[in-house]
Image (cartoon, rainbow, N blue to C red):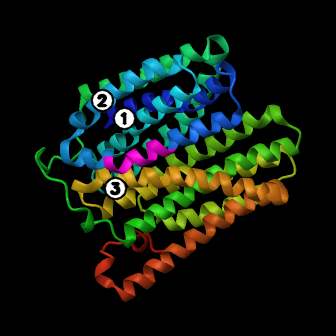
Amino acid sequence: MRNILLLGSLVRIPFFAGAVLLALHVVQTLDGSYVQAGALSTIVTVCIALSGPWRGRLLDRFGLRRTIAPSILVGAVCWSIAPFVDYVPLLILAAIAGLFDVPIFTVVRQAVIAATTEQNRQPALALEAVSVECAFMIGPIVGVAAAGIWSTTTVLFCVQMTLVLAGILLWIYNPPLRSAEQTDSAKSVPRRSWFRFEFVALCIGASAAIAVLAGSELTFVSAIREFEAQPLLGVVLAVWGFGSVVGGLTYGALRRKISTYLLLAGLGVVTLPMAFAVGPISLAITGLIAGLFCAPTITASIDQMSRIVPEGGRGEAIGWHSAALTLGNGIGSSLAGIAIDAGGFPAGFGAAAALGLGVGLGLPLLLALRSRRHPADVPEPVGAGQANV
């Protein structure tokens, strides 16, 4: 588990660096517009999201090596060409590479779940979530700094080849994706055995959590611009991210499980005070408090999913979960943008808070109503019930 967490942390740094480098490459090197850069990022994100469920199902059916071998080959071919071509070929090659993206997030989370028991899974997943936060903070900084020294063509090529190398290391290491109780020849379980209302509700909750975070991130930019303190934007975002790291480590140390929906509602509550910030300092303080609920909410959703999805279906389930997170990222940014245009940064934070609180309180009520009408469709134990919501 230590090895897979370390490898996952190292791999995600170039993953997050690559996202910002694509935009810089289009604008700086190809002399494209921000619209073109946004379109490229959107298409790549959608392709990666679409690949999640079916790549996860391949992991369940064929194992790690047979699933990622084509990804390594396709990624190596596409990204050895893409940085050196014009916009349209870059768009096509990046989209193809996205569809065959090495499912790093799915592999790492499935391997962590397989290496732990229900008793010690929560702290392991919390560490995994913290590693994602750290990579998210480090990756873009490293990518932008490298692009300031060398050309974006060279940096983009090196970053993407690093991801290909990471795929090769995963293929060599081949971490077990199932617990020791299951043999390598164990078959995947039917989707209908776990793809039910509770799983769908959990994905909606995870999507809403990411929407709150994405909306808050965009609103931070609006708030800092209104305060005319643009040089402090990185500091404020770093404080917000530090709060998430502290929250993730604290949640991992807890002995009891907390429902995803309860944490989501809490995330909505602690997001609201940022709407009343009067300057960069108060925004950073309220952001630090809001960050405490970021990593725990995502961690709880993965932990809860591992308890309602049988082991033979977790690869595909994590793929659907990742797709829901990607969808939530787009929803949150769009919602915040509309709110900010209508009422400034307070409306942006208010909309994000309302989304988290509304979905966090509404989903448990829907689950309760569903369990009363269709008891057989909501298997026990239900995550929300275990957390005494």
Q: Calculate the distance from the C-alpha at mark 2 to the C-alpha at mark 1.
A: 10 Å
Given residues 292 and 105, the one toward you in this image is 105
Q: Image check: 21 left or right of 261?
A: right
Q: Image check: 217 left or right of 11?
A: right
How far across and how far down the image is residue 388, in percent?
45, 74
Q: Image check: 7 left or right of 327?
A: left
How far across and how far down the image is residue 93, in percent?
46, 29
Q: Calculate the distance from the C-alpha at mark 3 to the C-alpha at mark 1.
A: 16 Å
Q: Is residue 51 magenta?
A: yes
How far across and how far down the image is residue 31, in percent?
69, 22
Residue 254 visible: no
Mark 1 secondary-structure assignment: loop
Q: Calculate the distance from the C-alpha at mark 2 to the C-alpha at mark 3.
A: 20 Å
Q: How many C-alpha atoms fall within 10 Å of the one at disc 2: few (<14), some, or many (≥20)?
A: many
Q: Which residues are magenta?
A: 46-54
Judging by the rendered image, the residue that carries numbered circle 2 is 170
Residue under the image location 62 percent in, 41 percent down: 242
Judging by the rendered image, the residue that carries numbered circle 1 is 102
Amino acid, disc 2 = Leu
Q: Earlier in the sequence, mark 3 or mark 1?
A: 1
The number of numbered badges drawn on the structure is: 3
Residue under the image location 64 percent in, 33 percent down: 37
Give the number of the disc on residue 317. Answer: 3
